[in-house]
Image: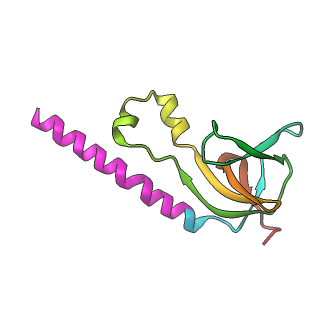
Amino acid sequence: MRQRFTIAVAIALTCAQGPAAAQDEEVHASPSFWAVTGVAPDDVLHLRDVPSADSKSLAGIPFNARGLKNFGCRRGELPFDQWARMSEAQRRAANTKWCRVEFRGQQGWVAGRFLKEDHAAQ
């Protein structure tokens, strides 16, 4: 029983420290500007009020938009007890990379998988 408790604590500490370190690396390695990628021409990338696909959409960013100012990216951070109760699919969704950007003067969050570095805007 004690060994299980020790392992659970070790896992919890590793999970608590891991995302923060990864988040710091992402923020420092991020480009100044993004371009939209992977969005169909008849669709938009939703600018969200908080980093969640379930949150309010503030604007639709066109599939070919460029020059989105980058304010940093992060991954979802959950308490260990909540993470432990989730399915693998839920864990992947919760670990989505979200980036805070500015588009046409409005700031919000977009899913990072739809962004690529915009070298021309720099």
Tell me the residue at 89%/36% (across/down).
42
Quarter of the image where one finds residue 118? bottom right
Quarter of the image where one finds residue 26? bottom right
Number of numbered labels in the structure image? 0
Looking at the figure, which quarter contains the N terminus?
A: top left
Q: Is 76 colored magenta in this rendering?
A: no
Q: Is residue 29 left or right of residue 107?
A: left
**What secondary structure is the magenta-colored segment mainly?**
helix
- Above or below: residue 82 compared with residue 66: above
Q: Position of residue 69 (x, y in %)?
A: 73, 64
Tell me the residue at 77%/44% (across/down).
45
Span of residues in magenta = 1-26
Tell me the residue at 48%/35% (across/down).
91
Looking at the figure, which quarter contains the C terminus?
A: bottom right
Q: Position of residue 24 (x, y in %)?
A: 49, 63
Residue situated furthest bottom in the rendering: 122
Q: Position of residue 82 (x, y in %)?
A: 39, 35
Q: Is residue 31 left or right of residue 85?
A: right
Q: Nearer the viewer, residue 105 or 86?
A: 105
- Above or below: residue 97 compared with residue 27: above
Residue situated furthest right in the rendering: 42
Residue situated furthest top in the rendering: 87
Q: Is residue 95 left or right of residue 32?
A: left
Residue situated furthest left in the rendering: 2
Question: Which colour scheme appears in the figure?
Answer: rainbow
Tell me the residue at 84%/54% (across/down).
65
Q: Position of residue 96 (x, y in %)?
A: 57, 43
Q: Is 21 colored magenta in this rendering?
A: yes
